[in-house]
Amino acid sequence: MKTFPDGFLWGGAIAANQVEGAYLTDGKGLSTSDVQPQGVFGAVVERVPGDSGIKDVAIDFYHRYPQDIALFAEMGFSCLRVSVAWTRIFPNGDENAPNEAGLAYYDKLFDELAAHNITPLVTLSHYEMPWGLVKQYGGWGNRKTIGFFERYARTVFTRYQNKVKLWLTFNEINMSLHAPMTGVGLPEESSREQVYQAIHHQLVASALAVKACHEIIPDARIGNMLLGGLVYPLTCKPDDVFAALQENHTWQFFGDVQCRGVYPGYMLRWFRDNHISLTITDEDREALRSTIDFISFSYYMTGCVTTDETLNQKARGNILNMVPNPHLQSSEWGWQIDPVGLRTLLNVLWDRYQKPLFIVENGLGAKDNVEADGSINDDYRINYLNDHLVQVREAIEDGVEVMGYTSWGPIDLVSASKAELSKRYGFIYVDRHDDGSGTLARSRKKSFWWYKDVIASNGGSL
Ligand code: BGP
């Protein structure tokens, strides 16, 4: 029986805006997520008093976290990835003092995890920022946002220094290219130069958070978080192979800056070729030298590129708009399922950076059917996760250092891309539906028992 290394962290990953609800409770301010009711690619809709959206309640984790954490503990989780909602701590983003009620909430959450021996892995900003910073300052387009973020980061590091030793800066930081409002608080129609300037500010802020974390919590480790968007050449034509290399650079750029502390040459050339000129100060260059301790990433799918325009049609629902791979099946949402790609990606990242890796999201979004007796037989989810975890084990045998695996959405939650509840990832079912109906009751799916066995056997049951 092949098992995973001792101390491998097993668990799940959730994000504040997709589970908590309570969107104005205890002094919380509006976030970009609150004004994007249709999800990360959706338009901004200004809130009016009395309106409501699916995320306002989400799955009510804000109030039900003790019960949910007990269920995670029952599965044997040793780790839970959560995010802090920046707007619970600094409701508008620019206050001089933090909101005590928001800080107290996460104290209780971390205490509950500790009571179950579950290690928290905490993302500072998961697809949200204070809406106030967008409206009043222009989001990450404004250099001042770096300072606001640094203050927020220092506040939470100081407050939770004895409770949280694993941190991540920005969720899927490379998604800023595809969803500028969600990533950097810029309108969709922003120019590439504006988006890259905002990304530069965010990369500096990420590095300053790394520095602050090392200063305030010397025994903590802090990582980045990339959308692991591995791209294949559609054919072995050399032009396609090079196109794939360049497409991979679009996400590797973020990892390169965060791991190496300098802008890579290929990016400087791309900026030159595209007449993009960024303002990068000596102070910024100095800040970027604070590099991350480990790399975390999400993995859902792969895609292909080709220089052949006739083949360059877009994949249905594929968030990266890549050419479909004829050798792969797709999920109901058009995401192409590729377990071997996860082994490849782990090897690519390890070869490139030689830093420990953490798979902090992976999972299958699917519609679940509740049987008359209340059972949910989600064998499709079990198969998906089993196939991926087998490849993780292979990568570990290849010599890749993997710290842990937190599957996405261990409990059903609101999807990020479309703000749906019918796209479910959980081992735990939540009785809530796209129209807002449902009791919010929790129940165990078949995959709950499967994951429990995987963890109990440290991967031996795969
Ligand atoms: C990642 C996000 C998550 C999560 C996941 C699944 O990109 O970091 O927040 O939601 O994708 O995507 P979706 O919810 O759109 O199915």
Image (tube, rainbow, N blue to C red):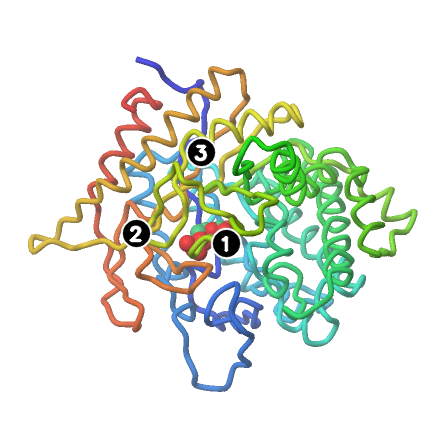
Residue 93 percent across, percent down from the top left: 67, 67
Q: Earlier in the sequence, mark 3 or mark 2?
A: 2
Q: Residue 172: tell me if it is visible.
A: yes
Looking at the rendered image, the quarter that the C terminus falls into is top left
The span from disc 1 to disc 2 (Cα, nearest Å) is: 25 Å
Q: Around disc 2, counting alpha carbons within 10 Å, would you say few (fewer than 14), some (14 to 19), or many (20 or more)?
A: some
Q: Is residue 296 left or right of residue 289?
A: left
Q: Is residue 101 above or below residue 258?
A: below
Q: Residue at x 68, y 52 (%)?
A: 153
Circle 1 residue: 313
Q: Report the front residue among 311 and 336.
A: 311
Q: Secondary structure at mark 3?
A: strand
- 266 vs 320, left or right, is right
Q: Earlier in the sequence, mark 1 or mark 2?
A: 1
Single out the mark in the foreground, 1 or 3: 1
Q: CA distance from mark 3 to mark 2?
A: 20 Å
- Residue at image location 81% in from the left, 38% down from the top: 265
Residue 366, numbered label: 2
Name the residue nearer the viewer: 150 or 255.
255
Q: Amino acid at mark 3?
A: Tyr
- Name the kind of residue labelled 2 in the image: Ala
In the rendered structure, the answer to whether residue 170 lies left or right of residue 7 reads right
